[in-house]
Amino acid sequence: MLNLQQVDKTWTLFLDRDGVINDEKLGEYVLHWNYFIFSKGVLQVFKKLSDAFGRIIIVTNQRGVSKGLMSQEALDTIHFEMQREVEIVGGRIDKIYFSTDANNDSPYRKPNPGMAHLAVADFPDIDFSKSIMVGNKPSDMLFGRNAGMSTVFVATTNPGEPFPHADVDLRFDSLAHFAEAL
């Protein structure tokens, strides 16, 4: 069982984006930076998360690009501005990985662990047994399990998901509540 008291700088935090860091519009995409709204309390906890974890990695499926609903440039701008806002409050995001693949069979689209393997290629010190995936969907939890990570479900957009669940180690109402438990 995941013990948050064991978390130190040797641990890596993997975060989903939509519904975890920012408000998710169900059935819609965050197409531009001006559509991006940090979820309540999230921006303020990034410093605490940055102090607790050695690495913070974002892993996000962004099929809106392959569907032609948004440009790669718009996605890059969202990520640049999100990272900048986090740095302004004293936090950090070490790298953002995203899959724009439309095909669910893509090795890089969650729940497949391709983005986790890209992170290890860039940061060889990442140890999946000392990594936590925080997400708001079953596919996020399965991504974590597929990579050998601990998992934390945040019930921001899917509060009816069953818990306890084999793919979920801990459950919180939000990323801010998870950070408070550290």
Image: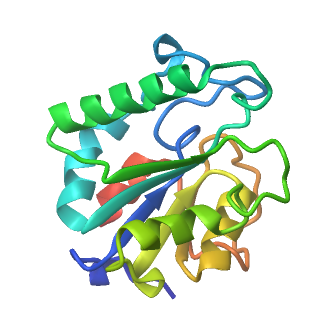
Q: Where is residue 153 in the image (x, y as percent from the top left)?
A: 59, 60
Q: Is residue 82 left or right of residue 47?
A: right
Image quarter of the C terminus: bottom left
Q: How many marks?
A: 0
Residue at 66% from the left image edge and 40% from the top image edge = 157
Q: Position of residue 80 (x, y in %)?
A: 36, 30
Q: Which of 174 and 148 is in front in this view?
A: 148
105 over 165 or under it: above or below? above
Which quadrant of the structure image shows residue 83? top left
Q: Can residue 171 be seen in the rendering of this structure?
A: no
Q: Nearer the viewer, residue 17 or 174?
A: 17
Which quadrant of the structure image shows residue 10? bottom left
46 over 74 or under it: above or below? below
Which quadrant of the structure image shows residue 101? top right
Residue at 17% from the left image edge and 60% from the top image edge = 51
Residue at 35% from the left image edge and 70% from the top image edge = 123
Q: Can residue 41 be seen in the rendering of this structure?
A: yes
Q: Where is residue 148 in the image (x, y as percent from the top left)?
A: 58, 83
- Color encoding of the figure: rainbow
6 over 54 or under it: above or below? below
Q: In this view, does 123 lie to the left or right of 115?
A: left
Q: Where is residue 12 in the image (x, y as percent from the top left)?
A: 36, 70
Residue at 69% from the left image edge and 48% from the top image edge = 159
